[in-house]
Image (spheres, rainbow, N blue to C red):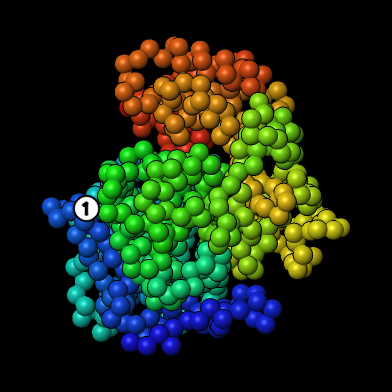
């Protein structure tokens, strides 16, 4: 097999080093290249931990994937036209990947969602289906019954046809009709996780996907074609899709498993990374909680045959937790994990995903900002032992051919380094807008800078009249590093002062071992009252919560000067989380106010 015909990164760069995709580059054109030049190589491997054969590997080559895409695509074309939406409601696995790519190949718009069995997210699924209005739903035989039951809740006129992937023979591909795709066609609708508002569909184009994958490859140094992916991230999530996207660029492969398999036994993730590390470079990605959980429950036995020497690990949360990184490094350094392995990064679905990360040889690091200055929008470093110290992890530098400015969100004026404001983004990786939401698209994707800095502007090279994406995230630049400090929508505002919920939640966890670390939500309600909801830590189900409540109240009162605080403990799993595992503070606040929080 020849790799000479595969996409070359240098072909994606202009004379100035900017990312410019070759004409006609789409997800499908990349897959077609792999079929032609490395067709017998493994494209995707799925580790099935649900059956009797623990970790049984199911593999598909690029050539066989191409056959499946034609077969599934042909069935899609029988009932859907160009631009129709095709929702994927299937369990994690090879069939999901094939269904996603086949929908795109058929000329329709893929809508990666999830099977209705996902607990606690039926309303999110219903919202996405009502919004996208798919003509077709793709699923598997195993999920058909639950999918049909869920679709019965839709009006007859809005009920999509159902295609069962694993019942389609390869021979169905004989009737496939080739469709010309162009870079600015919508590849798929990426629905947001719903951490701060109901989920909305982002229009992601082929140009945005291709550009962002090249940005990720360059930033994380994935240029070696012997780099493989390992992921348990759900394929309906933007980070999960990126893990099946980057092998398509240069003919590599990714090894996948289900989120449930990871949660039940995080050592499975470590073992898969170790297996990949012995073959070459391996890259993975996960949010904060995964690193904390694995450090707690996924440690191999001392002396176990685990080798993490060639692993690169992206941690992408807003903001990234240095304590999660430190715990993971401590747990896995004895198994060869390099000090430079973990890469704190920043991404957002509206930018396809990837925005920034630290350098190839850099180690994850944190500075400490003064809490009082943070409350007034200034990043002022203090010593780690200062009583007002708040750790902030550097996300390094912005990806090539992408721009990020820090602005005053009220006036759209660029702020100087050291000031905290809303992060605005610009680049060909930015999505086209929100599906069916023209007004919201203009507000979010059509922002314009009212003024730039006279010197040191981070908008250098962007036309003055250009539009920007308002992220809703807060951040700053300091000493050449980019920091993400939180989200505008999550800020706790009491008495005219702003506090970061993550800081309050950490204070609560530090105040009492009864708090399940990483599972506390802080928010404000009318009348300037602070609410802290915490899940009980393991083995505290029968403990009296009052001493913990008193300790948390004292710590929060001393640190933030707040006195009107309602603190409640709930069983593990009671705090709502998004489909990507983030705290859903907005949903938690709504349930608190309407009296349904913790009610089963």
In the image, 24: left or right of 68? right
Please say whether residue 481 is visible from this viewpoint.
yes
**Of all residues shown, which one is farthest toward the left?**
52
Q: Is residue 73 positioned above or below 313 on the image?
A: below
Above/below status of 187 relative to 570: below
Image quadrant in which you'd find residue 92: bottom left
Of residue 76 and residue 270, the one placed in the foreground of this image is: 270
Q: From this viewpoint, which residue is outermost toward the right? A: 454
List x then y, in percent, for residue 43: 32, 72
Q: Nearer the viewer, residue 106 or 381?
A: 381
Please, what secondary structure does the residue beneath circle 1 have?
A: loop
Where residue 385 sits: x, y (%)? Answer: 64, 30
Q: Position of residue 29 (x, y in %)?
A: 44, 80
Residue 436 in sight? no
**Residue that mark 1 sits on:** 49
Q: Is residue 463 above or below residue 364?
A: below
The number of numbered discs placed on residues in the rendered structure image is: 1
- Which image quarter is the N terminus in? bottom left
Q: Could you tell whether 76 is left or right of 407 in the image?
A: left
For residue 218, which quarter of the picture? bottom right
Look at 41% across and 22% down and name the residue there.
Answer: 514
**Dot 1: few (<14), some (14–19), or many (≥20) neighbours within 10 Å?**
some
Q: Residue at x 57, y 56 (%)?
A: 362
Compare residues 337 and 464 and report the one nearer the observer.
337
Q: Residue drawn at (36%, 43%), measured in percent from left and top?
A: 294
Point 26% across, 72% down: residue: 60
């Amino acid at each position: 097999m020849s790799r000479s015909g595969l996409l070359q990164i240098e072909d994606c760069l202009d004379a100035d080093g900017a990312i410019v995709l070759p004409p006609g580059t789409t997800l499908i054109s990349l897959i077609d290249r792999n079929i032609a030049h490395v067709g017998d190589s493994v494209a995707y491997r799925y580790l099935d931990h649900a059956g009797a054969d623990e970790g049984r590997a199911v593999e598909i080559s690029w050539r066989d994937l191409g056959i499946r895409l034609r077969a599934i695509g042909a069935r899609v074309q029988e009932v859907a036209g160009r631009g129709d939406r095709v929702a994927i409601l299937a369990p994690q696995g090879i069939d999901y990947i094939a269904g996603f790519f086949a929908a795109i190949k058929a000329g329709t718009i893929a809508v990666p969602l999830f099977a209705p069995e996902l607990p606690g997210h039926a309303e999110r699924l219903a919202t996405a289906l009502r919004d996208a209005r798919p003509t077709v739903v793709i699923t598997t035989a195993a999920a058909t019954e639950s999918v049909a039951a869920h679709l019965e809740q839709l009006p007859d006129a809005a009920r999509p046809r159902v295609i069962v992937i694993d019942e389609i023979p390869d021979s169905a591909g004989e009737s496939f009709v080739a469709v010309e795709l162009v870079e600015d066609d919508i590849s798929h609708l990426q629905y947001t996780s719903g951490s701060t508002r109901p989920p909305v569909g982002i229009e992601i184009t082929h140009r945005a996907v291709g550009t962002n994958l090249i940005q990720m490859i360059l930033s994380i140094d994935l240029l070696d074609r012997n780099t493989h992916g390992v992921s348990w991230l759900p394929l309906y999530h933007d980070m999960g899709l990126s893990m099946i996207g980057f092998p398509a660029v240069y003919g590599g492969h990714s090894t996948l498993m289900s989120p449930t398999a990871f949660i039940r036994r995080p050592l499975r993730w470590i073992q898969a990374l170790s297996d990949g590390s012995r073959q070459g470079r391996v890259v993975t990605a996960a949010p904060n909680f995964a690193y904390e959980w694995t450090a707690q429950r996924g440690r191999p036995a001392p002396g176990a045959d685990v080798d993490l020497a060639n692993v690169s690990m992206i941690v992408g949360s807003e903001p990234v937790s240095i304590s999660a990184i430190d715990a993971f490094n401590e747990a896995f350094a004895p198994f060869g994990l390099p000090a430079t392995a973990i890469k704190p990064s920043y991404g957002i679905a509206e930018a396809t995903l990837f925005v920034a990360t630290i350098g190839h040889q850099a180690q994850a690091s944190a500075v400490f900002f003064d809490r009082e200055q943070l409350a007034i929008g200034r990043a002022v470093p203090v010593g780690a032992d200062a009583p007002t110290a708040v750790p902030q992890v550097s996300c390094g530098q912005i990806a090539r051919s992408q721009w990020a400015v820090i602005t005053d969100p009220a006036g759209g004026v660029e702020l100087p380094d050291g000031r905290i404001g809303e992060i605005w983004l610009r680049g060909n990786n930015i999505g086209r807008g929100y599906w069916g939401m023209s007004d919201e698209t203009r507000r979010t994707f059509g922002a314009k800078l009212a003024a730039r800095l006279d010197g040191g502007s981070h908008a250098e090279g962007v036309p003055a009249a250009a539009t920007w994406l308002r992220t809703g995230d807060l951040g700053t630049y300091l000493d050449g590093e980019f920091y993400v400090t939180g989200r505008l929508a999550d800020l706790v505002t009491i008495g005219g002062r702003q506090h970061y919920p993550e800081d309050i939640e950490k204070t609560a966890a530090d105040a009492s071992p009864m708090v399940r670390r990483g599972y506390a939500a802080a928010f404000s309600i009318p009348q300037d009252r602070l609410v802290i909801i915490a899940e009980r830590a393991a083995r505290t189900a029968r403990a009296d919560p009052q001493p913990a409540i008193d300790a948390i109240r004292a710590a929060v009162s001393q640190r933030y000067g707040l006195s009107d605080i309602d603190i409640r403990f709930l069983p593990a799993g009671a705090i709502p989380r998004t489909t990507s595992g983030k705290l859903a503070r907005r949903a938690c606040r709504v349930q608190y106010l309407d009296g349904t929080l913790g009610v089963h």
